[in-house]
Amino acid sequence: MKTISPPQILTDQIEQLHCMETQIARTLPILAGSVLNVRLRRWLSCRARRARERRDQLKELLDLHPHSLASKSYDSIRSILTEGNRDLARIHHPYSRDVAMIEHCIRIEQHARTAYGIAVPLTHRIGFPQISVRLKLLLTELETARHSYHAMEAELFAIAACHPQPHVGNSAPAASIKYNGSRKSSGLAPLAVGY
């Protein structure tokens, strides 16, 4: 049975994070181009830029260790991106699509936080505390952004509720959008109706 050394475990963890951030950085600008809300579009562009920055920082860490980056893939984030993009393509009402978009992006970044949350203690336990600290900083940035996502989510729900989806002919009216109100606002200025 082959033994995996701590440096190999470290490299594998960083490669997976790098691959994940690469896929997120590629996807978010595409998503940003398909939303109606201008502030959401800017926010997604900003999150894409941050994903690229995190990816570049991970690449710097990889450059310190031997790796085979080209052969790695991170299928769990790929399936989240693919499924979410497929669901978004089915929504034609622009206000409802913006709500679905923010939900999709919350799932993407939740997955990223989980991946970093696993890598941070693991890298520390296998003897790389300095790298663990650097990964923790990237995780902290993702955790900070979560509050802004949830504040924007509540605002987009409110806007979508003011713009119900019209129904055509004998089709049933679209289900009204409801926000459960369980998430708190981070103090962002309200989005203007009319986008």
Image: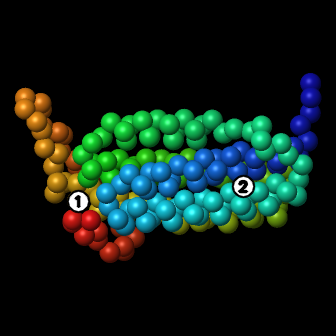
* Nearer the observer, 184 or 48: 48
Whether residue 26 is visible, yes or no, is yes
Which circle marks residue 120 in the picture?
Answer: 2
Which image quadrant is residue 35 in?
A: bottom left
Residue 117 in the image: x percent, y percent? 65, 52
Position of the C terminus by quadrant: bottom left
Which of labels 2 and 1 is toward the front? Answer: 1
Identified at 77% across, 41% down, the residue is 70
Dot 2: what SS?
Answer: helix
- Residue 174 at x, y percent in the picture: 17, 39
Q: Residue reaching furthest top?
A: 1
Indicate the secondary structure of the residue bearing disc 1. helix
Q: Amino acid at mark 1?
A: Ile
How far across and down, in percent of the image, does residue 97 sit? 31, 48
The answer, for residue 135, to whether it is visible in the render is no
The residues bearing labels 2 and 1 have C-alpha atoms spaced at a distance of 38 Å
The percent position of residue 67, horizontal first and vertical second, equals: 85, 46
Give me the disc on residue 88: none
Q: Are marks 2 and 1 in contact (CB under 8 Å)?
A: no
For disc 1, the marked residue is 159
Q: Residue furthest left?
A: 169
Q: Which of disc 1 and disc 2 is earlier in sequence?
A: 2
Q: Quadrant of the N terminus?
A: top right
Q: Residue at x 23, y 59 (%)?
A: 158
Q: Which residue is found at the position 63% from the left and 35% from the top?
A: 75
Give amino acid for label 2.
Val
